Amino acid sequence: MSDTHLCRALQIDRLDYLPGQLIVRVRSDAVRPGLESGTLHYTSAGAKALPAEVESPFAYLRKNAGLKGVHPLFSKQRANVERASVSDAEREQLAVLSSVAHAGSEDLTGLTVVSVDPSVMSPELLRHLGQAAAVEFAEPMPARWLAGSWTADPVRNLQWGLRAIRWFEAPWVDASQVGVGVMDTGIDRGHPDLLALDSTYRHGSFAPGDPLGHGTHVAGTLAATANNAVGIAGVTPCRLTMWKVFPDQPWSGSFYVDGERYLRALHEATTAGVRVLNLSLGGTASSQTEAILFRRLREHDVVVVAAMGNEYQEGNPVEYPAAYDGVLAVGAVAETLRRSTFSNTGEHIGLVAPGSDVLSTLPRRRSPYRHETDYGVWSGTSMAAPHVAGAAALAVARFPAKSAAEIREHLLRAATLVPRMRGKSWTKAYGSGLLNLERTLR
């Protein structure tokens, strides 16, 4: 499959939710009577401590929905649940108990990921679960996909984006100690333009490669080494943490985030030392669970940058996480400084950045999903977002006393109005205007 065909496939027939996956939050006060001893034993006897009213909705799923598994989303003892020598039903009971006993934070207690037969997923099933006395809410797992990438002839591009954001005119600021997180398809850390980067790679049980190349492209735009006599320059070097949250194979022709891994990564970002988080991904469904995690990121003073999405010509839907409160939503412009034809618009847009024909790094090896190697020109709001994440890292270094909210507002105030805004200070297509690095750092 060619890159162009793959990228076209990623733009159509999108799912709102991942089939067969639910997030069920049980009420912690309903579970705690079973934890009165103060210790949860990961045994058959320990499983029996789950109160009957809490077990009831899961028994219903077991009988009527082909329950396949229950996983405590934020328990610090997940491994003990998986290793326990118990029956499947007992493991599910231990998972629910552990989701309360070992969540580590009150606002994350009781959250479980539940797998069921996709064919029985329905609004009626969710309503039934939500009406259970021990269930706070039940929601389908939202689908999240990548907000890029089309390929083009590299000779069309000599990093016009850096010129557009006035990178060359900006004063030098050292952001090498600023932590920036990226949640994506992975990274080729051995790429010559990324080799010198201070990076941490959290791929978990996924293979360390990046077959699609999206994460490597985003990382290069953000932080590729400048002045090393090879390739390109990123916006700024930084301490990069990459979370691989996408599997290496598409599902029904498209790449969707691993929902459980992604939600856990959002939680990990609050304690991983990152000040900026780049999310070049999105989807049309909102989520109570995801919203909790973005609130926690705000409370931990993380500047969250997210792509607006590329579905303007498919109805221009509102996409998340860009539309959550406090997230800096980024649209894309072409070299003409007009909105890229694919770039979504909306009331939640913050600003725009270069997103059409962006030259950046790609993995050194080909894959079944990408024939280009080393460097490539891709388009998407995925490509615009890391320009802004890099600028946010520089702003954090330049103004260390500013909070995440203040950094966000500073970037918006420093943006440049573009001609298509016709003198307005804000529009649904361009937000506050084009990212301006020179103004941001003065």
Image: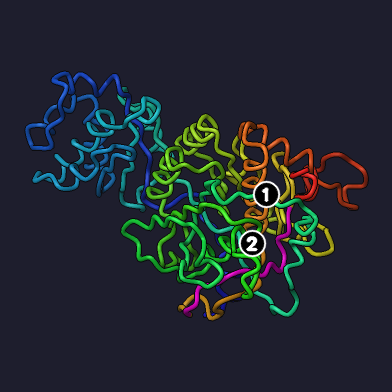
Q: Which residue is mark 2?
A: 234
For numbered disc 1, what is the local secondary structure?
A: loop
Q: Nearer the viewer, mark 1 or mark 2?
A: 1
Q: Which residues are magenta?
A: 353-365
Q: Position of residue 99 (x, y in %)?
A: 28, 33
Q: Residues within 10 Å of mark 1 (few under 14, many from 20)?
A: some
Label 2: state its secondary structure: loop
Q: Using residue 349 as the reference point, say whether residue 195 is left or right of it.
A: left
Q: Nearer the viewer, residue 120 or 192?
A: 192
Q: Is residue 31 left or right of residue 318?
A: left
Q: Position of residue 165 (x, y in %)?
A: 77, 55
Within 10 angstroms of label 2, few (less than 14), some, or many (20 or more) residues? many
- Compared across the picture, whether 109 is left or right of 324 comes to left
Residue type at mark 1 is Val
Q: What is the three-letter code of the residue carrying label 2?
A: Gly
Residue with the most extreme right position: 423
Q: Which residue is mark 1?
A: 173
Measured from the top left, where is residue 395 in percent x and y? Answer: 67, 43
Of 345 and 237, nearer the camera is 237
Picture layout, residue 356 above or below residue 46: below
